[in-house]
Amino acid sequence: MAAKILPGLLASVKEVIFIRLEDGDEVITKLKEVARRRNIRGAIVMGIGGIRRAKVGIFSPEKGKYEPEEVEGFSELASLQGNISILPNGEPIPHLHVVLGTKKGVIAGHLLEAQVQVTAEIFLITTSKTLSREIESRYGLKLIKDSNE
């Protein structure tokens, strides 16, 4: 099956925003605050930094939910990637994946929560089109909707 290109979402870069999070900040909460304050309706998220504690989920298609794993103690935020889209109620929702390096090894998955330790440096690349997350998949996930649908 070929990859599905969403023609209604062919967009250009609107602006690039740099965010520095401070020790103790909760990543998802702060990204939601910035998205609300700047009326961000679609963005690409990239970042690095340090994390004090996190909850990372691995999705279980059979159960239709994320199975969380707690990460305690300092870890390197080697990669933060994802997007910010809008739910039907107008609320911004960051969909983020992480790679965390710990003394015991590496953990990767869907970011459920994370508290910064030292700093996190995050870029938001906002888009000219709204990313609406409202299509329910057969697995119970809300997917991004093509604006032509």
Image (cartoon, grey):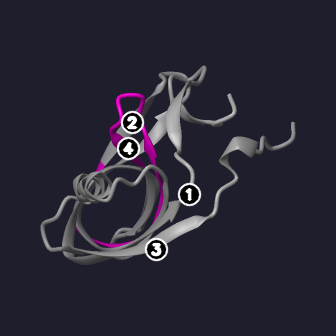
Specify the farthest residue to the right. Answer: 1
Please tell me whether mark 3 or mark 1 is closer to you in this view: 1
Q: Secondary structure at mark 4?
A: strand
Q: Nearer the viewer, mark 2 or mark 3?
A: 3
Amino acid on which disc 4 is placed: Ile
Specify the label residue 93 is tagged with.
4
Q: Amino acid at mark 3?
A: Val
Tell me the residue that label 1 is attached to. 128
Q: Which residue is mark 3?
A: 16
The mark that comes first in sequence, 2 or 3, is: 3
CA distance for labels 1 and 4: 17 Å
> Where's residue 82, x and y in %?
49, 56
Q: Which mark is residue 61?
A: none
Measured Cα–Cα span from mark 3 to mark 1: 12 Å
Residue drawn at the location 17% of the way across and 74% of the way down:
22
Residue with the mark numbered 2: 67
CB atoms of marks 1 and 4 within 8 Å:
no
Magenta span contains residue 78? yes
Which portion, as a residue range, is magenta? Answer: 70-94
Secondary structure mostly seen in magenta is strand
Dot in front, 3 or 4: 3
Q: Residue at x 57, y 51 (%)?
A: 129
Residue situated in front as seen by the camera: 68 or 121: 121
Query: Could you say where residue 13 lies in the image, as x and y percent from the top left?
Result: 58, 67
